[in-house]
Amino acid sequence: MPELPEVETIVADLRPHLVGRVIVRAELPFPTIVRHPEPEEFIDAIAGLRIVGMRRRGKFILLDLDGGGMLVVHLGMTGQLRLVDADAPIEKHTHAIFSLDGDSTSPSGAARHLPRERGSDLSNSPSELGGDSASPSGAARHLPRERGSDLSNSPSRPQQLRYRDPRRFGRLLLGTQEELLASKKMPRLGPEPIDPAFAPDELYRSLHRRRTSLKAVLLDQGAIAGVGNIYADESMHRARLRPDRIASGLSRKSAQRLHESLRDSLLMAIENRGSSVDTYRDAWGELGGQQEQLLVYGRAGEPCFTCGRPLKMIRLAGRSTVFCTKCQR
DNA sequence: TTAAATTCCTGTAAGC
DNA sequence: TGCTTACAGGAATTTA
């Protein structure tokens, strides 16, 4: 299930292939995946718009479009965004297809006049949805090997950006930032945990005012953006904190430890191109590598790597939660 | 106002 | 082998 590191990987991979290109046409084999505006309006409005920037905010993928609007993609649990040749077979559960003009990476393609007026300079982007994608230095920006090279040898060959989502928990939105926030189709999100500006004290203050479990606060996108079940469990384990502790009871020192472990867990996962524990695949359909490094998630009943005691599973905030009863207090 | 529970949805695995 | 059932989870909605 895509969380911050998985979304960051997809965005970093697709950005150089998408920015500068025009969405020639949109098709919606499963129209209800679009939550705003109405599907017919969505199809009409997006045709002919150029992608001028691509970034991440929490678990959302934001494609800045000509004219000030943006295409927002949330992958839900099983959503996949892939760039493929237009003649590639359409996989089952493909809910949206965006036909693109020439390859932006080609010297003869659309990128020769690549507009940099907005979106592409992340630090100057609007603040509310997060101007900066909070990309770490390095990590997914540098691919371990050439990705997407098998797409096509011919730059002029038509390509499509396809959205596939078997469980349909994901969604697509189109509109301006103000419009989407006002319509409440796009939630207000908390700070980016890997943003250098996110201070330990900010996390402490978020935790201090909540009388629910630590796990519930970490999963709350309004408190911290981008953390899901995997990295919540991993970071609490690294910080040696029990997930069912009441958040408001944490000391500054514990909050600082959690702040550090949260950053470490997320940055390492970005470095490893995300966790493919279920259906997650990157933009080229390949597996991530972080699932090999997970300390607790998905390991209930198995021995803790630190003390050897079997890891316990409980249910918190409606989610299965795995932790070590000895190491996490 | 806040927190918890419910709902959506389909692929997978376990049990019979 | 084939059927039923439980489970996975992000986030919006409903309930307490």
Image: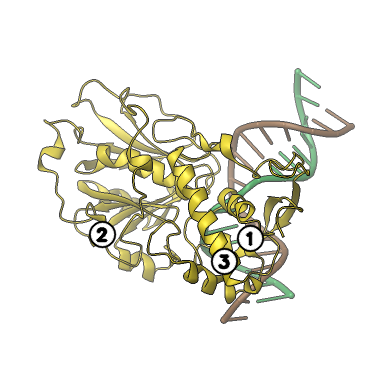
Chain colours: A yellow, B brown, C green
For this rendering, which residue is in front, A286 or A34? A286
Specify the subunit that label 1 lies on.
A
Residue designated by label 1: A215
For this rendering, which residue is in front, A310 or A157? A310
Which residue sits at x=48%, y=44%? A268
| Structural distance between the alpha carbons of marks 2 and 1 | 31 Å
Q: Are marks 2 and 3 in contact (CB under 8 Å)?
A: no
Say whether mark 3 and mark 1 are on the same chain: yes
- Residue A22's place in the image compared with A204, above or below, is above
Residue designated by label 3: A255
Residue type at numbered disc 2:
Ser
Q: Secondary structure at mark 3?
A: helix
| Structural distance between the alpha carbons of marks 2 and 3 | 28 Å
Which quadrant, please, contains the C terminus of chain A? bottom right
Residue type at numbered disc 1:
Lys
Q: Nearer the viewer, mark 2 or mark 3?
A: 3
Q: Secondary structure at mark 2?
A: helix
Residue designated by label 2: A123
Specify the subunit that label 3 lies on.
A
